Image: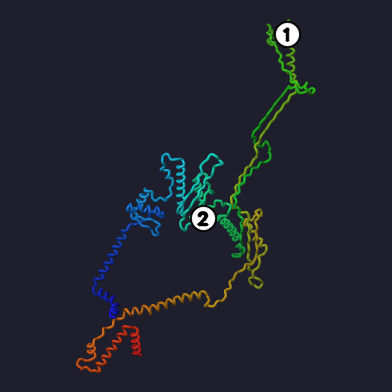
């Protein structure tokens, strides 16, 4: 029991010792300051770590760590193990030394594969290395996009052939690994498709398939006939544009919040290409350009026309032509050269040649006469002329872009106008027909109405219904605000009760137990007799009996106080209260 009472006095004894020895707190403070300085110095001397590699695979990470241990380079992992860190002054040196060992190996290889070509390599192996290098370079280019963490490119390039029918177009497949929480839009997907198609000959964007790490098809190859999000967004933007134009032109007339309009646009997303080739009718030859001209002319004279009795006798070939033979004569003396063969008039021929010269002369005269008289037989003249003119030809190639408006449908509802009646009360009255006609005309102009296109418009004048919410009367204690306020107050009240309970039932008894001063040691019999009896008087048996009884009562009270201090304290409080009364 004495040990239990002395236990709470140990902290007080420690404080008393500290007060008795003033150097001890100074020594403890100095030791704490020295420890703090040592910790600060050690922390300042710790090396600054920077990232060496991030997002390494397990195989590459093990190889890199083994190499770092061989090089005696300290390393540590970042929070979460996503990056490998080394001292800042050794980052670049370590990267170069690891690169000389070919680490990390998971990086995509590019055109550096063509740098170490062996002598005598086959054409097939060289083509495979070239294709691998091209795939690696394309993957590096795609990984430069902010949202792409890694990329893999697969190219299917067919073998070239001389036969046109056996030629095949190349295709490509791309797998994208996106950063967590990132996404790419359709514009970026189209950019990746055009990037790859521009790097491979004869590769079209339609032959490229792009897939993300979740297996979602990002490219729309093969779905050109389906509406995509871009086309739907275009239709909505077009309808909203027409709607704003209609409301903007009608609001100053009918007032704000007094007009409602809806527009439905039928948009044609088909791509149309057509070629027209037309020829105009024949024009004036004098105003046309000549492409080519050809003239053929034939003339036939002296031909004997066919005649006689039909039959075999008259259908005989002509006789062979016989040319007359003439012998030139030597001119005589005194005769001109041209007169050598012409004898004088009335001179007969020479002997031995009777009539030969006369026949020759007659033949010559006959020939001259026939030549002067003209051709004796019929003549045949023929002339053919062909002129080719340039054709008036018109060729027109038209390519219609998608997104044209095929048809518009507009519905407009106008609210009644507030006007004062005969009694001066504001009532809703319909708009006059002339004003409705003006509203309809303005709407047509704002929407670009076209009857050829088949547009339709409908303007209705009707009163607007105002939705007034009728809130039933709810008692105060059933209102949501009061219920929330009551819940909040009950929570605070519960916390207050818990605090009072903890104070009166837990904290206060503990404080009393450890702060109540210890009771004095029981006095001995000699001390009690010395206090009660004066030394000069003899001991009285009655007094001794009363003293013994008092001592036993006092021992009982002390024992009760040690066993139940609260009971003793309550008794003392009652005594004090009675004394105050």
Q: Position of residue 35 (x, y in %)?
A: 28, 65
Please name which of the two marks, 2 or 1, marks the residue nearer to the observer. 2
Using a 10 Å C-alpha cutoff, classify the residue at mark 2 as few (fewer than 14 neighbours), some (14 to 19) or many (20 or more). Answer: few
Query: What is the C-alpha distance between the residues marked 2 and 1?
Result: 125 Å
Which image quarter: residue 33? bottom left
Locate the C terminus and report the quarter of the image it occupies.
Answer: bottom left
Give the image location of residue 567, x and y in percent.
34, 85
In the rendered image, which quarter is residue 254 located in?
Answer: bottom right
User: Mark 1 or mark 2, which is nearer the start of the sequence?
Assistant: 2
Residue that protrudes farthest toward the top in the picture: 351
Which colour style is shown? Answer: rainbow
Query: Front-most of 355 and 225?
Result: 225
Looking at this view, name the residue that lies furthest to the right.
309
Name which residue lies at 47% across and 50% down. Answer: 152
Give the numbered dot on residue 216: 2
Q: Is residue 140 left or right of residue 50?
A: right
According to the picture, the residue beneath numbered tag 1 turns out to be 343
| Foreground pick, 379 / 146 | 146
Density class for disc 1 (Cα within 10 Å; few <14, some 14-19, many ≥20) is some
Relative to 464, say whether 11 is above or below. Answer: below
Q: Give 377 or 255, whichever is nearer the viewer.
A: 377
Residue 344 drawn at (x, y percent): 73, 8
- Secondary structure of the residue carrying tag 1 is loop
Instruction: Give the residue at x 33% y 57%.
Output: 47
Task: Judge from the rendering whether residue 279 lies leftward or rightward of residue 41; answer left or right.
Answer: right
Q: Are marks 2 and 1 in contact (CB under 8 Å)?
A: no
Residue 304, label in figure? none
Q: Quadrant of the N terminus?
A: bottom left
Relative image position of residue 123 (x, y in whole percent): 46, 40
Q: Looking at the image, which is closer to me, 206 or 402?
A: 206
**Secondary element at tag 2:** loop
């Amino acid at each position: 029991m004495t040990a239990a009472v002395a236990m709470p006095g140990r902290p007080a004894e420690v404080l008393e010792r500290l007060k008795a020895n003033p150097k001890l707190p100074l020594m403890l403070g100095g030791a704490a300051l020295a420890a703090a300085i040592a910790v600060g110095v050690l922390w300042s001397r710790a090396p600054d770590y920077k990232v060496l590699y991030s997002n390494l695979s397990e195989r590459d990470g093990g190889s890199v760590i083994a190499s770092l241990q061989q090089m005696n380079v300290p390393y540590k992992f970042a929070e979460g193990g996503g990056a490998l860190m080394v001292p800042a002054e050794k980052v670049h040196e370590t990267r170069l030394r690891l690169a000389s060992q070919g680490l990390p190996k998971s990086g995509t290889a590019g055109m550096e594969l063509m740098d170490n070509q062996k002598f005598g390599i086959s054409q097939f192996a060289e083509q495979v290395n070239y294709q691998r290098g091209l795939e690696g370079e394309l993957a590096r280019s795609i990984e430069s996009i902010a949202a792409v963490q890694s990329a893999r490119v697969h190219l299917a390039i067919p073998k070239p052939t001389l036969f046109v029918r056996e030629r095949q177009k190349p295709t490509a497949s791309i797998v994208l690994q996106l950063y967590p929480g990132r996404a790419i839009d359709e514009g970026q997907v189209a950019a990746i498709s055009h990037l790859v198609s521009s790097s491979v000959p004869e590769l079209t964007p339609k032959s490229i398939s792009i897939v993300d790490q979740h297996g979602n098809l990002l490219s729309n190859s093969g779905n050109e006939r389906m509406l995509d999000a871009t086309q739907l967004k275009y239709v909505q933007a077009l309808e909203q544009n027409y709607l704003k134009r209609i409301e903007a032109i009608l609001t100053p007339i009918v007032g704000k919040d007094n007009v409602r309009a809806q527009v439905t646009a039928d948009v044609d997303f088909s791509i149309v290409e057509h070629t027209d080739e037309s020829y105009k009718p024949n024009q004036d030859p004098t105003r046309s350009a000549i492409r080519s001209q050809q003239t053929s002319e034939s003339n036939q004279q002296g031909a004997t026309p066919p005649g006689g009795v039909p039959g075999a006798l008259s259908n005989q070939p002509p006789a062979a032509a016989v040319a007359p033979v003439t012998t030139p004569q030597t001119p005589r003396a005194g005769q001109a050269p041209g007169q050598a063969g012409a004898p004088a008039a009335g001179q007969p021929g020479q002997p031995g040649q009777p009539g030969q010269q006369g026949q020759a002369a007659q033949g010559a005269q006959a020939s001259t006469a026939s030549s002067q008289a003209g051709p004796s037989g019929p003549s045949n003249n023929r002339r053919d002329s062909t002129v080719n003119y340039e054709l008036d030809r018109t060729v027109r190639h038209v390519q219609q872009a998608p997104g044209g408006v095929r048809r518009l449908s507009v519905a407009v509802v106008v609210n009644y106008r507030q006007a004062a009646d005969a009694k001066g009360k504001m009532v809703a009255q319909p708009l006059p027909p002339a004003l409705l006609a003006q509203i309809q005309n303005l709407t047509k102009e704002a929407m670009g109405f076209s009857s050829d296109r088949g547009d339709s418009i409908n303007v209705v004048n009707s009163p607007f219904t105002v939705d007034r919410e009728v809130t039933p009367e709810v008692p105060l204690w059933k209102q949501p605000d009061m219920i929330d306020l009551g819940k909040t107050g009950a929570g605070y009240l519960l916390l207050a009760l818990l605090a009072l309970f903890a104070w009166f039932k837990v904290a206060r008894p503990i404080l009393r137990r450890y702060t109540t001063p210890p009771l004095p040691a029981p006095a001995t019999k000699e001390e009690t007799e010395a206090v009660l009896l004066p030394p000069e008087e003899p001991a009285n048996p009655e007094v001794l009996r009363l003293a013994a009884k008092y001592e036993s009562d006092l021992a009982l009270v002390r024992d009760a106080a040690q066993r139940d201090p609260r009971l003793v304290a309550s008794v003392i409080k009652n005594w004090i209260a009675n004394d105050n009364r």
